[in-house]
């Protein structure tokens, strides 16, 4: 099996992902939906050989030791892909995410207005939330690219794995991969704080220690950008607080109230005529928002977003309404996401 050829076909078809499973035909994800390719069922032996051909000896050893592997590769005629190899009932399987060759820009993602103030911030926490496959990585990559163009700063990224590659422009950009350049996010973040950073991008806030260190970094003069797997801005705040034990929660809410700058939660919706477009909920840390976070009154944040358009805020319902008004999506898509 020539996996590189299948990936090239996926790129030509405009797919975002390619799935290869023993006992199944190859599948592409196009416009958010899985579609089977017109190919034969893949056998375990042929699939394993095709996948191992992509790896060097060190990565094969890691795969055999762990029985699963997460990495990113640069492949000729394909470009950069994120790859997860794993075992399932019928044998080996692989999920490939196709990474665009060009670094996304805020303009291309329609994020210029949302993130306009970020370039002026020298500290604080910016969260990007959303479910898997909602474009969080692209959003953060575009934000890092904008900072790289506009500021003379030291930007450190902690990613698992590194997807979009940034070249230094006005800034110095150091990209570190978890499992390859650092043991885990918490260790990488501890080290980053000793590396004279101005901006720290964290691929995912996964655990208590990483959240604690991210809040401290944001409080102590660093701009911290991070993603969380949540479906709304309010859920993003709740998620950070809930990883801590009850006695610590008041302190964490106080730290979050002081350090938070903005939360953007996004979903991808089918676009009229094909493709997908992002709908984004935006919460800006105004004094009223900080006060509600500090006092644990997160349920009232939604009403603040509803009335906070002047401060750059919007609810998901308002975002979907704007996409309908611009005739980018059908009303039925908005009802599905509401």
Image: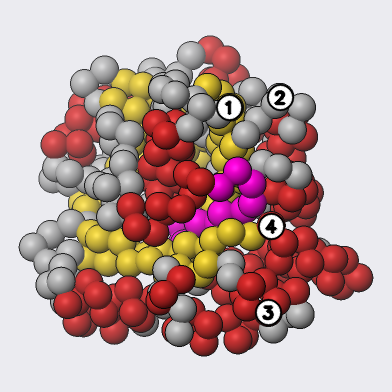
The residue singled out by tag 4 in the image is 259
Q: Name the residue under label 1.
A: 154
Viewer-closest of 48 and 245: 245
Q: In the rendered view, would you say 4 is above or below 215?
A: above
Mark 3 to mark 1: distance in Å? Answer: 33 Å
- Tag 3: Cα neighbours inside 10 Å, few (<14), some, or many (≥20)? some
- Residue 240: image x %, image y %? 69, 63
Checking the image for residue 105, the label placed there is: none
Do callouts 4 and 1 mark residues in contact (Cβ within 8 Å)? no
Q: Earlier in the sequence, mark 3 or mark 2?
A: 2
Task: Give the mark nearer the N terminus: 2 vs 4.
Answer: 2
Q: How far apart are marks 4 and 1 (CA)?
A: 20 Å
Instruction: Please state the extent of the stretch shown in magenta in the rendering.
Output: 121-132
Reading the image, the residue beneath label 2 is: 195
Quadrant location of the N terminus?
A: top left
- Nearer the N terminus, badge 1 or badge 2? 1
Comes first in the chain, label 4 or label 1:
1
| Disc nearer the start of the sequence (3/1) | 1
The residue identified by callout 3 is: 292
Mark-to-mark CA distance, 2 and 4? 21 Å
Q: Quadrant of the C terminus?
A: bottom left
């Amino acid at each position: 099996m020539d996996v590189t050829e299948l990936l090239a076909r996926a790129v030509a078809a405009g797919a975002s992902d390619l799935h290869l499973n023993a006992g199944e035909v190859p599948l592409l994800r196009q416009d958010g939906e899985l579609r089977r390719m017109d190919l034969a069922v893949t056998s375990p032996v042929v699939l394993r050989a095709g996948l191992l051909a992509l790896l060097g000896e060190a990565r094969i050893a890691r795969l055999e030791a762990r029985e699963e592997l997460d990495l990113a590769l640069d492949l000729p005629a394909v470009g950069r892909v994120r790859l997860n190899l794993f075992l399932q009932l019928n044998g080996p399987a692989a999920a490939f995410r196709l990474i665009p060759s060009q670094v996304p820009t805020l303009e291309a993602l329609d994020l210029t207005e949302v993130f306009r103030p970020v370039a002026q911030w020298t500290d604080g926490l910016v969260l990007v939330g959303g479910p898997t496959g909602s474009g969080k990585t692209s959003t953060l990559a575009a934000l890092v690219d904008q900072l790289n163009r506009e500021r003379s700063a030291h930007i450190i990224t902690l990613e698992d794995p590194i997807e979009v590659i940034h070249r230094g422009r006005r800034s110095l950009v150091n990209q570190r991969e978890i499992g390859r350049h650092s043991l885990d996010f918490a260790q990488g973040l501890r080290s980053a704080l000793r590396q004279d950073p101005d901006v720290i991008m964290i691929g995912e806030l996964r655990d208590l220690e990483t959240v604690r260190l991210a809040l401290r970094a944001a409080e102590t003069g660093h701009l911290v950008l991070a993603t969380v797997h949540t479906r709304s801005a309010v859920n993003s705040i709740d998620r950070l607080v809930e990883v801590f034990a009850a006695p610590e929660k008041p302190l964490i809410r106080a730290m979050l109230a002081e350090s938070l700058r903005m939360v953007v939660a996004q979903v991808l919706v089918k676009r009229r005529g094909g493709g997908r477009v992002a709908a984004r909920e935006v919460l800006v840390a105004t004094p009223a928002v900080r006060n509600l976070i500090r006092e644990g009154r997160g349920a009232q944040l939604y009403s603040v977003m509803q009335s906070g358009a002047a401060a750059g805020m919007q609810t998901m319902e308002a975002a979907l309404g704007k996409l309908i008004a611009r005739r980018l999506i059908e009303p039925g898509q908005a009802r599905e996401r509401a």
